[in-house]
Amino acid sequence: MKKRIIQAYCLITVLFVFFFIWSMGKQKLNIKRFYNSEGFQSMTDYSMDLKFNEESPTKMSYVYSFVLGNVSDDFNMLFFKSLHCLAKVNIDGERVYELERPKSLLGWSSPGNVWNQLTLERYYSGKEVQIELIPLYDDFKPGNLEIYVGSQYDIIEDIMWKDFPTLVLSLFCIGLGVFEIITLIIITLRKIETHLSLMMSLFYIFAGAWKLMDTDTYALWGTSYPGYAVWRFLLLMLLSCPMIFAIREMCREQRGLWWLACLVNFANITVCLFLQVCEIADLRQTVTITHLSLCFTMACIIHLAIKNVRLFGYKGEVKPVVLTVGSAMIWMVFEMVDYCCNTTSAENLALFGMLGFIAHVFLYTLQLFRNMKEMMEVGMSARQYEKIAFHDQLTGFYNRAAMANYIDNAEFAPQECVVAVFDLNNLKKCNDSLGHDKGDEYIKESARIIRESFGDLGQCYRQGGDEFAVMMKQVSEDICYERVEEMKRKVAAYNSRSKDIAMGIACGFAKYDEREDETISDTAKRADKMMYQEKFLMKQQQK
């Protein structure tokens, strides 16, 4: 069940990503402008009147009127924000701007959150401006309209400065998630154990992106792409599953309500998208269903956290789980309060909730990385001990224990395997007459020649003393003969340069044959037989 749910969720996420890329290219607002810096003015001295309008579901539109001050070359931009409304601007009775309903995208036809911008001419100074907002939803609440007149760059700077805390926290949350995913991929490839969670990292990215799309700064960028308003609701729907999976992994919960929470989330996504595509109700109108799904998810997560505290106590790995759950839940509750109340106090509350969550996650991630660093150091020490246990210190070849470990591995298959064995002539004579230092040099030079001749075909082993072996796969006997001749040429070249005792390397090889060999050891015995015949011939030639 877990595997199928993860696969389904990943499929939905991939489809949403493709939909996002496609929607950015397909949908743009249709804005008509019928006709760049220093300072700006926030317009608060305006009047609001109601007007009958057939285009609106409420049959009403809201007209905001004010008189322009002095317009100059550096003070010539009008900004005002509309939320799920069509907009028209008249100056002195003349239509100069119109925000029309965008082309439907899977049933979504609202402009979303838009910062409307138009350039003012100098001769507009002292004339009356009328901004008409035509709401597209029945629950539209008229309020104070944000209107700015002045320098374009100063207005944008002011809007961005107001969003600065949210922008920083959102980008940090996204960056943390991306960094954790990259780290997770690297340490997985290195086969290092970690408590980093892919699903938790996805939650950070989705939550940060969702909050980023809720800012006025993003609305400035997305003015020409109303599809981003759809993505705010899609990301909100995608938040539940990564969170529930992450907490389930932290709690090591195999059975429980987690799967039901995932199914509820999938049902929420399916129902809301079905209503959206069929143009019965769009994602903004079904956001209450999404909030209820989130509440059910939070209830399941709290249940898992309480269960783990009862089983294991508030200590060890349980403590960070509870803190993560608590900070995330508080943040989500504050965000829903902010959405419902839409007041400055609620917005600040949500911001502090996000700050608390990110602060905890950051500290928790630091602790995970400290633990991971300690585990990597332990792993490096273990690899060093393994290298000592399985390598010959003199030649750098694998040793007899490594060869036995390779053969005894359950995945080892002798088919197509070729065993080559080697024996050094005159090593004892070299040790007795020239000393063990010269004997060691003899062994190292012999190992070098064996590696140069056979190293690219397989793994080289020193079995002890003057005995070596090479295990090869899918190598023909003709190639082995060629490499033996190459080795003999290298030995002859070395002997021509060396004034010490002449080097001699006897070699034999055999390919695994099911008709003759029960195990690879039988193949090695046949190779030994060929090697001893070669060794005998070499000694006969030295007499």
Image (tube, helix red, strand yellow):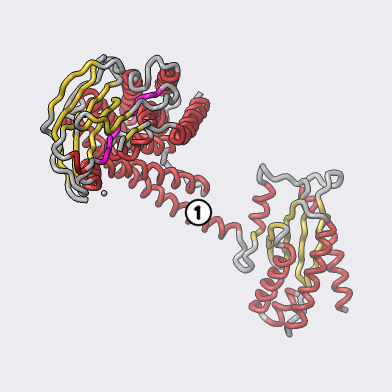
Q: Residue at x 69, y 82 (%)?
A: 434
Can you give x and y, in whole percent of width and height, for residue 214 in the image?
30, 34
- Residue lying farthest left? 45
Camera-side residue: 234 or 5? 234
The vertical placement of 116 against 385, above or below, is above
Q: Is residue 117 rendered magenta in the image?
A: yes
Is any atom of residue 260 visible in this view? Answer: no
Image quadrant in which the C terminus is located: bottom right
Q: Is residue 180 shown left or right of residue 536?
A: left
**Apparent side of residue 29 relative to residue 408 in the rendered image (left or right):** left
Residue at point 15%, 38% (across, down): 42
Residue 410 sits inside the magenta stretch: no
Which residue is the site of mark 1?
A: 382
Q: Which residues are magenta?
A: 108-119
Quarter of image, res 514:
top right
Residue 534 sits above or below residue 166 on the image: below
Q: Label 1 sits on what residue type?
A: Ala
In the rendered picture of this protein, how many numbered marks are placed on residues? 1
